[in-house]
Amino acid sequence: MLMKTVPAKAGTVVSGPRKIGISARTSASRLTINADQKKQLAAEAALKYVDEDTIIGIGTGSTVNLFIDALAARKLRIRGAVSSSDSSTARLKSHNIEVFDLNATGDLDLYVDGADESDRHLRLIKGGGAALTREKIVAAASRRFVCIADESKLVDVLGRFPLPVEVIPMARSYVARQLVLLGGHPVWREGTITDNGNLILDVHNLHIVDPVGLETTINQIAGVVTVGLFAKRKADVLILGTPTGVKTLK
Ligand code: 5RP
């Protein structure tokens, strides 16, 4: 039932901020920009949601890395950040941005994170970078969730991207059997250990027409820590980088 596989996402090369050299107003017919450049546009557009003197929630992934870099380059005077992963913590600290424990901050005004897929209702699949549990916690504790992505992440129906599920190690096979009963094809992301010491199953072959229902059902399987469906706490704003600039959905 469980096949060996490579991680759901290969690493993405991160372009440094301000290296793109494109204008959002340039004619689309003359413009070809790659996915990283679209991510950069989305990341920079999210800066306008940041209020100075606040602590902001920070997600994980290549788009968020661009956001962190843009935040530092713009020299916005924030108090600091709550991070959703060890990798984001390291990047924040490399820019001398103070990282706070969520237990010490209370709820946050803003959470900025990427996504693996979004539908037009801003319900998301996340967890390609295996940080879904802490991402879900910080998103839940934030009043506004701004999601940043390149336009390829927008889909009509969630499920083309394999749905990540973080599981307690001893429950891996049990949870996989339950996911098969739900119609999915779970694949163990071998070699990946989450920041919480758990494993990831990537569930293929899902056509998710009821994201809230499926999120609830998978959450209730014994041994599941977190399912990468962000439907109950979806994004409030989705900023998509496109060849002609950003497109914002609310
Ligand atoms: C990490 C995530 C990321 O937000 C998601 O994988 C998108 O990553 P990227 O910005 O690199 O495309 O959920 O767990």
Image (tube, grey):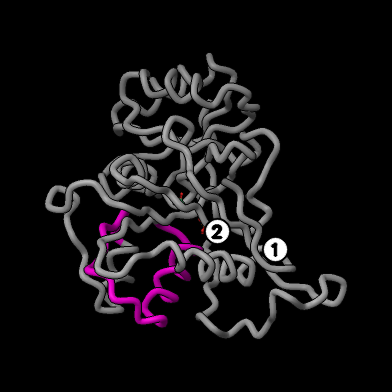
Where is residue 134? Give x, y as percent. 31, 46
Where is residue 189? Give x, y as percent. 46, 43
For label 2, being within 8 Å of ligand 1 is answered no
The residue shown at (58%, 27%) is 185
Q: Is residue 69 magenta?
A: yes
Tally the marks.
Answer: 2
Q: Which residue is mark 1?
A: 242
Compared with 243, 233 (above or below) is above
In the rendered image, the residue lying farthest to the top is 181
Give the SS element for disc 2. Answer: loop
Identify residue type, mark 2.
Ala
- 12 to the left or right of 246: left
Question: Is label 1 or label 2 in front?
Answer: 1
Q: Which residue is mark 2?
A: 10
Say which label, 1 or 2, has the lower sequence index. Answer: 2
Q: Which is nearer the eye, 155 or 145?
A: 145
For label 1, being within 8 Å of ligand 1 is answered no
Label 1: few (<14), some (14–19) or many (≥20) C-alpha neighbours in 10 Å: many
Where is residue 11? Give x, y as percent. 52, 63
Q: Which is nearer the eye, 131 or 66?
A: 66
Q: Which is nearer the eye, 158 or 5?
A: 158
The residue shown at (64%, 67%) is 38
